[in-house]
Image (cartoon, rainbow, N blue to C red):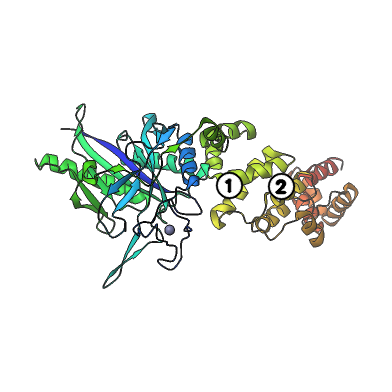
Amino acid sequence: MDFENTIGLETHVQLKTATKMFCSCRLKTGCEPNVNVCPVCLGYPGALPVMNKEAVKLTCMSGMMLGCEINRHATFDRKNYFYPDMAKDYQISENGNPLCIGGGVEIETPGGRKFIRINHIHLEEDAAKINHYAQSSGVDFNRGGTPLMEIVSEPDMSSADEAIAYLTALKEMLVYAGVSDCNLEEGNMRSDVNISIRPVGSAKLGTKVEIKNMNSFKAIHAALEFEARRQRECMAHSIPIVQETRRWDAEAMETASMRSKENAHDYRYFPEPDLVPVELGEDLIESWRKLLPEKPEARRERMANEYGLTGYDAEVLAQAKERADYFEKAAAKAKKPKLLCNFFMSDVMSFFNENGFSAGTEEALAALFNLSTDGKINGPTLKELLPEVLRGEIADPEKAVAERGLGAVSDMAALEAFVEQAIAANPKSVADYKAGKKAAAGFFVGQVMKLSKGKADPKVVGPLVAKRLAAM
Ligand SMILES: [Zn+2]
């Protein structure tokens, strides 16, 4: 019997706010454990939560990017559970009335484009981090209370590849909106997955298994592939699949049972009595909508038209927002933006691939490129100075060119003198040329470049040499 997968994702995204969800403790990584804490995030009795408005705003902006409907009246609930990472013994979350409802993202699949629906996005506080040592474990509450947005997808994906495409699209949107860094390795984007299998064509969903503990897209992909295989083997041997939470073991490259899956009622959700509902007016929502950036998809299309790029090149260029912003700011200052685009796609991108993103300004890049399109420096000089501009070592390319005497020799009289000099010094090559060896012209261009100490523009010298030789 053939089976198909049904996959849904619950993606937790830490929001880029300055302070925690319900207190004013700052959010900073790399600190000593338990320095960014207070009675609220340590769960002291009587300490009252105060809502972080910025977190509400960033969640709503994420929802708008993802096409969700924004709930005008959202409420918080207590999700009760006992674990050392949550000192209050409950997590403040949104159960029945989340901030964002519906929406989704489009992904590319071998069978064409597919829309993956989002069920809802809710806002909650992150738990503390438990660190395990050789003989003991410790709880670090610096992370406790971080604003966390949970994006719950519908079970619309049918392969590990589709799940990764969905996460990639999600990450791109959220990074574009500036709501999170979405760095999986640093744990500010984490995804649990649900997977079940059912006979192809069956309307009834199979028993769902949740997998946790993946900290990279690669691990998520591997965990889904493993679990899809495991469940098929269970079916083949008539072993019932149990509803449970399994843990991904990255070393063994397999999932292992963690606990039987809890149901929502196990958490005894009830409305949070210490927080008033979030009431959002139209004006406020519209003011947030104005802050949204152009969506990646729209930007790709616009850039393809504006700079005459192929679809693939536009995708590469628009992919990382910071890089695309940098390019567009430079292009706005460039005299020939389309030419800059070609140069950016080749030389600048290859520099980034090898050395990381630019430390220089977009003004410096545009200024350097303008020197080249104005004929003030030649191609080799452009390439020579580029790394220094991108490393931020040259802020004013025009000044650097003047100081180092790299300006192109564009004085025609000087260039003609070089041509004469090259011809006079190489009678044999002139004879070769006259005998029909047209390649000898290239030799003269090389000679002129040498005489000008590399500062002539070969594009100007070429025709000059050709004209002189033809006249002989
Ligand atoms: Zn605190």
Find residue 152 and report its horizontal and vertical position in percent: 34, 39
In the rendered view, tell whether residue 131 sits above or below residue 2.
Answer: below
Asked whether the viewer can see residue 435, the reply is no
Asked whether the viewer can see residue 264, the reply is yes
Q: Quadrant of ligand 1?
A: bottom left
Find residue 207 and report its horizontal and vertical position in percent: 18, 38
Q: Is residue 76 left or right of residue 408?
A: left
Find residue 3 and report its horizontal and vertical position in percent: 20, 34
Q: Is residue 407 left or right of residue 115?
A: right
Kind of residue indicated by mark 2: Ala
Kind of residue indicated by mark 1: Arg
Q: Which numbered marker is on residue 366?
A: 2
Residue picked out by circle 1: 323
Residue furthest left in the image: 238
Q: Is residue 462 left or right of residue 200?
A: right
Q: Is residue 419 left or right of residue 152?
A: right
Is tag 2's residue or tag 1's residue first in the polypeptide sequence? 1
In the rendered view, tell whether residue 47 sits above or below residue 288.
Answer: below
